[in-house]
């Protein structure tokens, strides 16, 4: 380990355009987990029209957005794609979520309108589907020997992504839909790119993934690094456990009953506790998407 | 000068808007007949019998749940009645000559409805409404059942319904409102509504289905709302804030829809009032905020006393006192006044009467509601999306001193499953001012995690799932004479309030 404090150089792409569901929580997780360890970090925000120096970047965040924000991002990303591709080929670390994931692939064909072209660094294609996959997800991830983890989070996407030759899935779906609701895969990996449909704050409640990205980013900056100092992750572990339990609840109408039974701690003792809607199904706009 | 130029540009782009802007005093040509009794053609006997049975069962369910003190029957009677007669809402609405108003949007529905009810009552109307904010189909039907007699006739002259943004697609065709209000569209429960734009699309279909005799009241300061269904037949009425003193220089982080709806170019703002609400224009295609029919031209706010505002309307100027703090309540008042103007009232709305009616208003339950809890005070704040959380938090932080806080969220059909939006709330502003923090609800772990990354000390934070125990612990940590601030989602807010109700610190929300 070098004596001087190390620095992780983070590039946060499209902080305003692609940030739909608390995605900035991923940035907060990386920043805090650096700060708690005395690791320095810099954050460069790059919105439309700004091409950051990807060669001087260790960790790139590219998040989700709705179809029309994604279209705007795709147009702008075309101008950034050469440098971004080079950075990825030289093992800069990337976390790509939802639309960000699709934009690293070859194309996303929405249900209406022309296809949106990605930069194609990931050999994946995405087709719009008739039904949105919305719900809790649990994924088994294998990051190498001795590094098996469960990824927990929430997905909300209508795109179905199919993996091609140069990528591996990020993991296998234990609950939820994942890439396409068909083949049991979730996300994609290529070099140090980690792409997923788990939107919003996936890193805070999966601290193992946050730390994996940080250590790979430090490896990118300093070639050789020692393991990260451990942190007290009690809140993280509890939130991760709670998210896994939500993902593994039984589907459909039994969900409410099962949730009531498995609820941690005694239920609050007042008649009005029963939420006005739990026993009701007619008002539900979107179904529980388990497979 | 620049704004004038922009407005002219806007008028050239859209001829219809020019007509809008110049029609200063408009006469409602097809007013809702606001008289009781009467009604449309009688139902066949079997349909009438089914309706009577559903009404009787619904009323019995309401009486039973009140007797058992099981939540005041804000949705259970509707569930029962709807099970017996699926067409009950359509039948009650069709049988009544009451004026019908449906209010939807992300934020401000409940408070706006209370304001509108106060204005309508000041003009001599009797009102049936789903006052406690139970705004899914069963809550709406419960209100209709409560307001109707056993033949399905409404006693009241105004049926005022706040309806969830997704449920409105079911409710509107049945109720056929004379006035339809969209308060604003913020990101709110994307796990239920899919994407923001698909929700907007749903609202467009609802607006397009309105007849030419109806009025759609739209927030002109919300770029997405103002652009809804431009070709719809219904008369359009735009409200907004035209007082530059009230604005911020640029949108805050949680702002949605800050790109031009027409050409996708980022919007410019002459003034930002709240999140993405403000006086906007597009530098690319020169579209801009529409001319406002009801414009708040003066705002003088204080954190304790609310706002003194002046509103210019087609019926003249209304100086009003909004007793509820925050600019969001200025929007709510402008929205309510717009609806009151769209309706034809038995007595025309008098500025003095409107002012007195609004000034008497108490916060809706859970809207920074102040509750005396023994020798401590509780301030109960219902928060459901980044915008409402940020606005409420800003009001709380205007009050001096460190804050004892209880934060609670639960996943339910009403509150949604996905709490990712908590990461869009600027809790970093609250954490340095914390005196103590307790988190609760079925999603307490998620709330804890968010506060930890906002800088809260996990070691000194209590995580207590049970709401009653959490409230007890949080109050114990609050010294006598001080305030406990509760930030909670809908379901935990209702639960915490009913705990306080059992302590007789607060009256039941259905008696509010």
Image (cartoon, coloured by chain):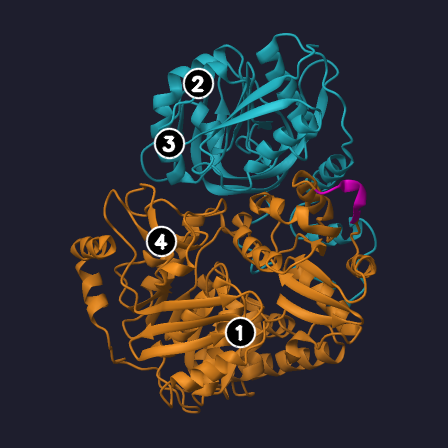
Q: What span is in magenta?
A: B456-462
Is the Cβ of the residue at disc 4 closer than 8 Å to that at disc 2?
Answer: no
For marks 2 and 1, give the CA distance.
52 Å
**Residue A35 badge:** none
**Chain letter, colour cyan:** A
Q: Are marks 1 and 3 on the same chain?
A: no
Q: Secondary structure at mark 2?
A: loop
Work out which quarter of the rendered image holds the N terminus of chain A and state it: top right
Q: Residue at x 65, y 55 (%)?
A: B412
Question: Residue B22: x and y, percent?
Answer: 20, 69
Residue A92 forms part of the magenta stretch: no
Q: CA distance from mark 2 to mark 3?
A: 14 Å
Chain letter for the residue marked with disc 3 in the picture: A
Which residue lies at the image location 55% right of the left edge and 37% below the top edge?
A: A24
Left or right of residue B415, residue B283 in this image: left
Residue B323, disc: 1
Name the residue beneath numbered marker 2. Answer: A53
Q: Earlier in the sequence, mark 2 or mark 3?
A: 3
Q: How many angstroms separate mark 3 from mark 4 (CA)?
A: 21 Å
Identify which residue is drawn at 62% across, 12% down.
A219
Q: Which residue is mark 4?
A: B223
Q: Residue B65, percent across and down?
A: 71, 76
> Mark 3: few, some, or many residues within 10 Å (few <14, many ≥20)?
some
């Amino acid at each position: 380990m070098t004596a001087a404090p190390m620095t992780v150089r983070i590039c946060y792409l499209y902080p305003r355009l692609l940030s739909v569901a608390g995605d900035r929580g991923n940035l907060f997780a990386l920043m805090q987990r650096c700060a708690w360890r005395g690791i320095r970090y810099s954050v460069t925000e790059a919105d439309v029209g700004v091409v950051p120096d990807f060669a001087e970047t260790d960790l790139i965040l590219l998040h989700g957005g709705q179809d029309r924000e994604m279209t705007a991002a795709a147009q702008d990303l075309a101008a950034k794609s050469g440098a971004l591709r080079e950075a990825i080929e030289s093992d800069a670390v990337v976390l790509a979520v939802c639309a960000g994931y699709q934009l690293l692939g070859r194309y996303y064909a929405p249900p209406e309108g022309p296809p949106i072209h990605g930069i194609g660094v990931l050999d994946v294609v995405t087709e719009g589907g008739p039904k949105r996959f919305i719900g809790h997800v649990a994924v088994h991830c294998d990051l190498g020997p001795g590094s098996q983890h469960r990824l927990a989070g929430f997905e909300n996407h209508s795109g179905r992504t199919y993996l091609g030759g140069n990528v591996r899935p990020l993991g296998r779906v234990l609950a939820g839909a994942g890439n396409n609701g068909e083949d049991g895969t979730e996300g994609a990996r290529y070099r140090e790119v980690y792409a997923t449909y788990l939107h919003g704050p996936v890193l805070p409640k999966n601290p193992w993934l946050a730390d994996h990205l940080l250590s790979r980013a430090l490896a990118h900056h300093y070639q050789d690094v020692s393991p990260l100092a451990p942190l007290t992750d009690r809140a993280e572990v509890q939130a991760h456990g709670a998210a896994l339990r939500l993902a593994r609840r039984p589907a459909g109408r039994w969900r409410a009953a099962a949730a009531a039974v498995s609820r941690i701690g005694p239920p609050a003792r007042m008649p009005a506790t029963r939420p006005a809607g739990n026993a009701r199904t007619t008002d539900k706009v979107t179904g529980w998407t388990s497979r | 000068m620049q704004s004038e130029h922009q407005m002219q540009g806007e008028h050239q782009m859209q001829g219809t808007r020019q007509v809008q802007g110049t029609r200063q005093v408009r006469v409602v040509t097809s007013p809702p007949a606001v008289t009781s009794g009467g009604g449309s053609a009688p139902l066949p006997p079997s349909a009438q019998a089914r309706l009577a049975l559903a009404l009787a069962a619904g009323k019995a369910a309401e009486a039973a749940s009140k007797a058992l003190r099981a939540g005041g029957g804000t949705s259970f009677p509707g569930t029962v009645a709807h099970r017996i007669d699926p067409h009950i809402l359509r039948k009650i609405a069709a049988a009544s000559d009451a004026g019908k108003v449906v209010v939807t949007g992300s934020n401000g529905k409940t408070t706006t409805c209370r304001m509108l009810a106060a204005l309508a009552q000041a003009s001599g109307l009797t009102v049936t409404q789903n006052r406690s904010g139970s705004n899914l189909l069963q809550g709406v039907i419960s209100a209709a059942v409560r307001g109707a007699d056993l033949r399905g006739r409404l006693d009241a002259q105004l049926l005022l319904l706040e309806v969830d943004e997704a449920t409105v697609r079911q409710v509107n065709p049945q109720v056929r409102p004379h006035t339809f209000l969209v308060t604003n569209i913020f990101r709110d429960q994307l796990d239920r509504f899919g994407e923001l734009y698909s929700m907007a699309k749903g609202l467009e279909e609802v607006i397009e289905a309105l007849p030419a005799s109806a009025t759609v009241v739209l927030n002109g300061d919300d770029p997405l709302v103002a652009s809804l269904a431009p070709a719809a037949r219904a008369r359009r009425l735009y409200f907004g804030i035209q007082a530059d003193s009230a604005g911020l220089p640029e949108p805050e982080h949680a702002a949605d829809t800050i790109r031009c709806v027409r050409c996708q170019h980022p919007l410019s703002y002459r003034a930002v009032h709240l999140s993405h609400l403000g006086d906007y224009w597009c530098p690319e295609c020169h579209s801009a905020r529409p001319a406002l029919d009801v414009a708040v031209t003066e705002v003088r706010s204080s954190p304790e006393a609310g706002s003194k505002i002046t509103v210019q309307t087609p019926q003249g100027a209304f100086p009003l006192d909004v007793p509820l703090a925050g600019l969001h309540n200025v929007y709510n008042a402008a929205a309510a006044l717009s609806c009151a103007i769209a309706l034809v009232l038995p007595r025309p709305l008098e500025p003095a009467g409107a002012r007195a009616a609004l000034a008497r208003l108490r916060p809706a339950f859970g809207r920074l509601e102040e509750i005396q809890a023994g020798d401590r005070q509780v301030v109960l704040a219902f928060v459901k999306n980044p915008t409402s959380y940020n606005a409420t938090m800003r009001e709380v932080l205007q009050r001096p001193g460190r804050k004892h806080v209880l934060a609670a969220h639960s996943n339910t059909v009403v509150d949604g499953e996905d709490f990712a939006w908590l990461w869009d709330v600027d809790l970093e502003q609250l954490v340095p001012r914390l005196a103590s923090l307790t988190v609760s609800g079925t999603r307490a772990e998620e709330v804890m995690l968010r506060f930890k990354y906002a800088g809260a000390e996990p070691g000194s934070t209590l995580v207590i799932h049970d709401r009653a125990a959490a409230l007890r612990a949080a109050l114990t940590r609050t010294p006598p004479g001080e305030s406990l601030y509760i930030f909670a989602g809908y379901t935990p807010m209702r639960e915490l309030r009913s705990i306080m109700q059992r302590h007789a610190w607060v009256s039941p929300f259905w008696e509010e």
